[in-house]
Image: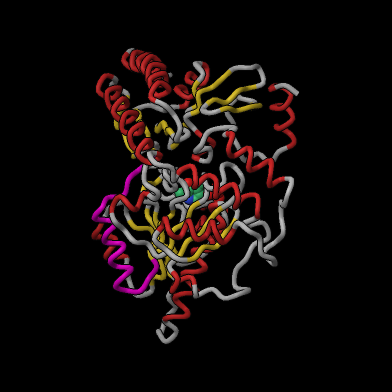
Amino acid sequence: MNFEEIAALEKTALVPTYDRLPILAVKGEGCYLCDDRGKKYLDFLGGLAVNALGYAHPELLAVLRDESETLLHVSNLLYHRYQAPLAEKLARLAGLDRVFFGNTGTEAIEGAIKLARAYARKHHPAEPFERTEILAVENSFHGRTLGALSATWPEKYRKPFEPLVPGVRFVRLNDVAHLRESFSARVAAVLLEVIQGEGGVVELREDFLKTAEELCRANDALFVADEIQCGLARTGQWFAYQKFGLKPDVVVVAKPLAAGLPLSALIARDHVAQAFSPGMHGTTFGGGPLQCRLALKVIEIMERPGFLEYVREVGAYFRAELEKLRQEQPVIREVRGDGLMLALELTVPCKSVVRKALEAGFLVNCIQENVLRFLPPLIIERRHVDELIAALRSIVAALTESEMEGVTA
Ligand SMILES: *Cc1c(COP(=O)(O)O)cnc(C)c1O
């Protein structure tokens, strides 16, 4: 079936949850995606930060081929060879001790919320009230199941599904005084993204992060870092919180972990992880041999000398080029982000920019109406960045002209 046939069939066959870009993806290689007409796109979306090593990476394909013929699934009732080594590796990278494997980011957030409650109940049973509150941050995104959704900020995601899980309180973004005011002995955990992804690539400030950590430490609440989007080398550090020397009690990762297969990890301090005992939490698919073996290879590749430095270098170059563009183009309000998690905030909606970029052969993403977000594979090169910047320059310049003429794009 071609694009038109697939798009027509989806209109009636799927639950209408997605507003897709008009591309039928059929193949990918490196940083390029190919549609059914043979058109190539340079990918600055990276499968939403999942395809960190690009498409069809030969070493990942070799692991996939071998393990898919060996063992796909055994359930968590048995041992297999790959969970423990992967857990040990992730824990070491995060400076933590134990791992629970799930399938999606949202599922790992649910696990973190449950762990925070279990921990509070185990260690503070004598209090005259329940320690069940979660402090989240305005503008956050933590997922779409009821627990994770309760800690997700935009009303449009939450409202239709209320009542949600009670006890979540939102702290104003980077507002240290409000954070202190909102904190109490009822708080089981503070949950935050060091760089908010879906919220528009917004960095939390160091003083805010450090205060959150201190308050948690002083009150024996869990400090939980949602590193699903900003973690695993995206910013040129293993985890975005490492830039500030933070020591979370729980770290959650997912998106790029198994290169496109569903796999998430909840990584916790030993003392915290011990709040779960057998039977308290689980999952059928989580941490299967194929996913875990693939994730071991992903991490092995990212651990090679120079990989993280490369991400920082290309990211800094990309950011500097975006900054130059901002100085030239009045419709660009701000450049944000770190490493290869970057964004341009425009003064106008960016839907038309995404469409024109697609026509020019670039896959970019628009969030929050007016924020262009870039989450390219971490193997992207300077010449790719140059190509995108050149295309954006002409697209955005045309926008600026139409703006100045008072024409809406
Ligand atoms: C994508 C994302 C999630 C949800 O992950 P899913 O795999 O879609 O369930 C949660 N938190 C952050 C920061 C994310 O970017």
Residue 249 position within the rendered picture, expressed as x and y whole percent measured from the top left: 40, 65
Query: Range of the magenta residues?
Result: 201-222
**From the viewer's perspective, is residue 164 above or below residue 388?**
below
Residue 183 position within the rendered picture, expressed as x and y whole percent measured from the top left: 32, 68
Q: What residue is at 43 percent from the left and 19 percent from the top?
A: 409
Q: Is residue 76 magenta?
A: no
Q: Quarter of the image holding residue 367?
A: top left
> How many numbered circles are shown?
0
Residue 316 position within the rendered picture, expressed as x and y whole percent measured from the top left: 31, 33
* Magenta span main SS: helix
Q: Is residue 221 magenta?
A: yes
**From the viewer's perspective, is residue 304 above or below residue 111?**
above
| Camera-side residue of 63 and 44 | 63
Q: What residue is at 49 percent from the left and 63 percent from the top?
A: 112
Residue 236 visible in rendering = yes
Q: Quarter of the image holding residue 398?
A: top left
Check the image and name the residue furthest to the bottom: 126
Q: Does 30 sit left or right of 210 as displayed? A: right
| Camera-side residue of 343 and 62 | 62
Residue 288 position within the rendered picture, expressed as x and y whole percent measured from the top left: 65, 55
Location of the N terminus (image quadrant): top right
**From the viewer's perspective, is residue 333 above or below residue 285?**
above
Q: What residue is at 49 percent from the left and 65 percent from the top?
A: 98
| Camera-side residue of 264 and 180 | 264
Q: What residue is at 40 percent from the left and 66 percent from the top?
A: 189
What's the colour scheme? secondary structure
Residue 160 visible in rendering = no
| Camera-side residue of 351 and 52 | 52
